[in-house]
Amino acid sequence: MALRVAVAGASGYAGGEVLRLLLSHPEVEIGALTGGSNAGARFGSLQPHLLPLADRVLEPTTQDTLAGHDVVFLGLPHGQSAPVAAALGEEVLVVDLGADHRLKAAADWEQFYGSPHAGTWPYGLPELPGHRQALKGARRVAVPGCYPTAVSLAMFPAYAAELAEPETVIVAASGTSGAGKAVKPHLLGSEVMGSMSPYGVGGGHRHTPEMAQNLTPLAGEPVTVSFTPTLAPMPRGILATCSAKAKPGTTAAQLRAAYAQAFAGEPFVHLLPEGQWPHTGSVYGSNAALVQVSLDEHAGRIIAISAIDNLVKGTAGGAVQSMNIALGLPEELGLPLNGVAP
Amino acid sequence: MALRVAVAGASGYAGGEVLRLLLSHPEVEIGALTGGSNAGARFGSLQPHLLPLADRVLEPTTQDTLAGHDVVFLGLPHGQSAPVAAALGEEVLVVDLGADHRLKAAADWEQFYGSPHAGTWPYGLPELPGHRQALKGARRVAVPGCYPTAVSLAMFPAYAAELAEPETVIVAASGTSGAGKAVKPHLLGSEVMGSMSPYGVGGGHRHTPEMAQNLTPLAGEPVTVSFTPTLAPMPRGILATCSAKAKPGTTAAQLRAAYAQAFAGEPFVHLLPEGQWPHTGSVYGSNAALVQVSLDEHAGRIIAISAIDNLVKGTAGGAVQSMNIALGLPEELGLPLNGVAP
Amino acid sequence: MALRVAVAGASGYAGGEVLRLLLSHPEVEIGALTGGSNAGARFGSLQPHLLPLADRVLEPTTQDTLAGHDVVFLGLPHGQSAPVAAALGEEVLVVDLGADHRLKAAADWEQFYGSPHAGTWPYGLPELPGHRQALKGARRVAVPGCYPTAVSLAMFPAYAAELAEPETVIVAASGTSGAGKAVKPHLLGSEVMGSMSPYGVGGGHRHTPEMAQNLTPLAGEPVTVSFTPTLAPMPRGILATCSAKAKPGTTAAQLRAAYAQAFAGEPFVHLLPEGQWPHTGSVYGSNAALVQVSLDEHAGRIIAISAIDNLVKGTAGGAVQSMNIALGLPEELGLPLNGVAP
Amino acid sequence: MALRVAVAGASGYAGGEVLRLLLSHPEVEIGALTGGSNAGARFGSLQPHLLPLADRVLEPTTQDTLAGHDVVFLGLPHGQSAPVAAALGEEVLVVDLGADHRLKAAADWEQFYGSPHAGTWPYGLPELPGHRQALKGARRVAVPGCYPTAVSLAMFPAYAAELAEPETVIVAASGTSGAGKAVKPHLLGSEVMGSMSPYGVGGGHRHTPEMAQNLTPLAGEPVTVSFTPTLAPMPRGILATCSAKAKPGTTAAQLRAAYAQAFAGEPFVHLLPEGQWPHTGSVYGSNAALVQVSLDEHAGRIIAISAIDNLVKGTAGGAVQSMNIALGLPEELGLPLNGVAP
């Protein structure tokens, strides 16, 4: 019998992408589509690419509209997930696309988000050691941020193998959909096309503590993260260029072996053959993450680069993958592995 | 038992897109991948977005490598399909992504392609009246050109309902993948980004006679086509803006009814609600065609606009849809209906 | 002595582009920069590309701030130009970047803009026969719309030479800056990149009567305009693809001669050599218009295509060119002829 | 009397951009335009955006065609500049857009370029301490690489003020024109649009030793450079994100003061106000460099980011600026300070 699934925030980019994936998921029946200010609108006017849902009407996000589902995906503004989840009951699988339940340290949450911490949920990055197990049977899932997904996949094998010094320098380029569908002047097409621009420079981006939280336990020592995000003239994709000083004596062969082992058997994370570097265009629309690593002998640094689609592996795909694991379904069900290229 | 399918020209954009679709097709097992100058290369270095095929090796396109398959897709240069198909035998389904077998009139072929005509095959545009029936059980299929697909879907209902005068003026914008993967200076990213440019102006584009061939039988009088293609700064998509003088007395209601009727029950062609116009971004990666039509009362013209993904409905998707019909499979099998947006 | 020039609406795209050009104009001293809701802001935060003005502060648009200038450019919302101009006095040159004073027929204005007509000013398209003369000494100038500029330059020679039937079909692609800087969901970078979309289809675009107004007097009979604008994934540029039935007996040579004669001596409008078609990328940032024309013998249609930068020749460049003429300065002063390519 | 200037390699992107700038230079008369395989072609077919030169014909690059000029710009393949310069005579100003004469250490040249070193010329980055003086009266100039220009401007003030530890980590995004006009599959528009991709990872990019050469003398200790370039989906622009560990005790105020002092009086390098970060879109077509710097207190790192147009300040603009200095002309002559935005 099909799972009945609701999506709150269905008119946004994250919610829309969850629906695109669920429409191909063989075990899912799509239930309520809810939203805020757009409630009452024909869904086809909001998400014209989702043809099978075009004649649906967006409902308001309320306890009533979300009731009666097996799974509820939440694409809500910060701070709203906890009360909605509480009202849904403990037996419903709630997958939070937002940030509310990602951070373990309340102090980090309060510093970066400026509101009281709502608690921590199982973290939807199954490739990170220990996390797949924690997701099995879970009824609450916090989907990782898009940048932490890309960065953690690129760097965790180096830390898990104790090959990297505990300071990581990251510069990541993201497509504009990562900034969401809210209209802001700097996100206008005229401003974005033909231009690269940094933002949140100097340690201020909210994804910074989430990266440190993911890498530190594997390193066995506190990992300092220097993270600079940039906005790239493309709708989708994250290219995360990460580096850290190699521990003394580290060899290229050790590094390669560590990455090969870390990703062995992973359905969605692929270590590319030597010499081939990841392009975000290769994972457009796909749940795959492509990773490559290299040792810069002259500078003594490990350079690890990953490419993901911020809306798929970085958000909606990671969410559906976590749903599959939580419910005991095959992990890859309904998830595209091939990118839409060129 | 799975169908065994080969793709000749697997390193090109059309061949790659056929493979992307076939990888999601439940009845297909992918056989030989063949190519020309790239033969011998690791497939992952040529099409890095097709992860499940990354470790394959591209074989040369020969009678031997293509033998032993149930279906063979041909993405070959003009003039090469006929001999390859002949060697494969009559029981093998051959789906030609190229132009060789699209045109009925040898004179048109010779004028626009400058070589002897190789004969006509059943035409893979099932939505065009009469063609779905002709595809059933076929063992040879000529996949339509990308522009003729977009234009024919936009205009045929007006002609079938005898509402349009027999001169159509078309301006279409295409993404760059329509020009293929061969490297030419004007297709460099630096030249293409930030620029719109026309080409083949003045009746010279090879798709012109194919459009006339599709519309004339429905109009019951010879349809003249004035076609101007333009290159748009995007990888995929065709937006075809078509117009014709309305026959005297034509009303907007008649027009709308004609289109609604023409597309009723079609799985992939959608007439949008009044006031909503098609965007190519809505069909990115999808086999859908979005159509809208309007009567400009002042100018007395019918304006019909369609949006397709040139590589899917315009090439590979149309090809797989035709394969499904030819083999008696469900027409929609393995074909995405949702676009990858934003 | 330098002309003192004010720009009202200096934080918008049109106003910013006027300033970019004026900063290179040897006879101009930039006076007040005024705006609406942004008044009080550091100019460098609004238009960071105009470095010499970065430390200026945007003033409110009032009678006082605009007083005391020789020339005032107005980039204001519809309906606001007339009172502002009246307050400035008759000896001040007022160049209106908006639509208020373009249309001659009050009925057209009222139908398309829905407000009372404010009267007609000399029209800033000097290349259109008769208009350069009318601009000399003028103290009020209505800058043409961007689409009418592109379309009129492409088609007027055919009508002036009586070679075209009086129905023109136009499909034009515009960069997103033509839609201005106001934030609207469909103008987000995520929506625009990778997508072509039509709008104002079916005769509803406000530039339609302006095109007819420009072509009809030259044709000597009423010209019907069927105009479909489309939004292209690029910040700047208009490619206007225009066609009309050729009058019986028209030859390609006649057509070419008519265009060569029409543009002879024009500093900014260039007829390309036969076989070369205009790209918008070639006029990026330039005041040039590139035009090509062809006779489609089969369809019996004249195809004329122009490329301009919508913000330069289509707005700010046409405005400065008109200012130069009105004030008796060399027409080309301060205006770039070379595009920024690639 | 005007300077007579020749450009060798005039059909390439660097040569074309030099010509775009020279066409606005009041002291220059454009002499020979020469090229390789394109010799004999109408220049308007090669660089259609340079309208005043459209009817010129490209000449072959020979001693004869380049003779008789006051200044010769060389946009030639590696290794060809030295003999051409030798043949021109010592009194002619030769400005080399290529890499041949940038590096001081022959060993670096041989390691990264694999050919014998041709000697070092005065280095055309006048903002780097000591270099403006060395350019005065020079008759040979080596124009810096585009990445070293962006990186050196971003980082040299931190080293000159002894605030940064001698290891710099750089990730830079470049527009595709930086890769030149030679057709290569990975530079096709279809491949580039919508995708970010790294290249030359792990210390292999040829601009790496040039960066170290620029920073080391100011640091007073050898600076190690870890440089990862990425290709961004835009035609122009470099965004260089650079960081280094701050020396103990470094304060944000010290850092800001160092940058303010380093750029004081510079016509083209601008330190943005605090909180405003550089966008490449702001310097499109301009010779400006925008820089911002920040101290990440948590990570203890200095983050410095610069934006330039790779073809202007990064190549042709730097070349013309150096020509102006070498010849005793005003340094800013003929150089645009305003970007073409949006």
Image (cartoon, coloured by chain):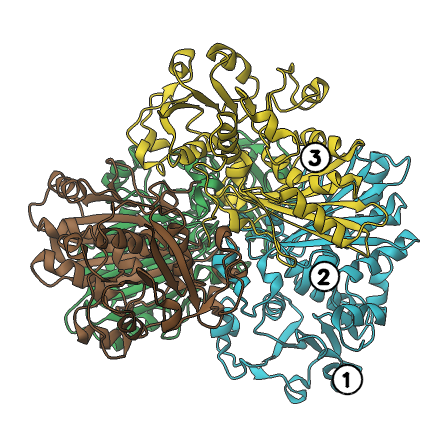
Chain colours: A cyan, B green, C brown, D yellow
Residue under label 2? A205
Disc 3: which chain? A
Residue under label 3? A275
Which residue is at the front of the view, D80 or D24? D24
Chain-order first, disc 1 or disc 3:
1
Residue under label 1? A86
What type is the residue that disc 3 sits on? Gly
The image shows residue A203 at horizontal and vertical percentages of: 75, 58
Let me know if marks 3 and 2 both belong to one chain: yes
Q: Residue at x 38, y 30 (%)?
A: D27
Mark toward the viewer: 2 or 1: 2
Let me know if marks 1 and 3 both belong to one chain: yes
Drawn side of residue C340 relative to residue A255, left or right: left
Element at label 1: helix
Binning the other alpha carbons within 10 Å of mark 1 as few (below 14), some (14 to 19) or many (20 upward) gives: few
Element at label 2: loop
Disc 1: which chain? A
Chain-order first, disc 2 or disc 1:
1
What type is the residue that disc 2 sits on? His
* Residue A234, above or below D25: below
- C-alpha gap between disc 1 and disc 3: 49 Å
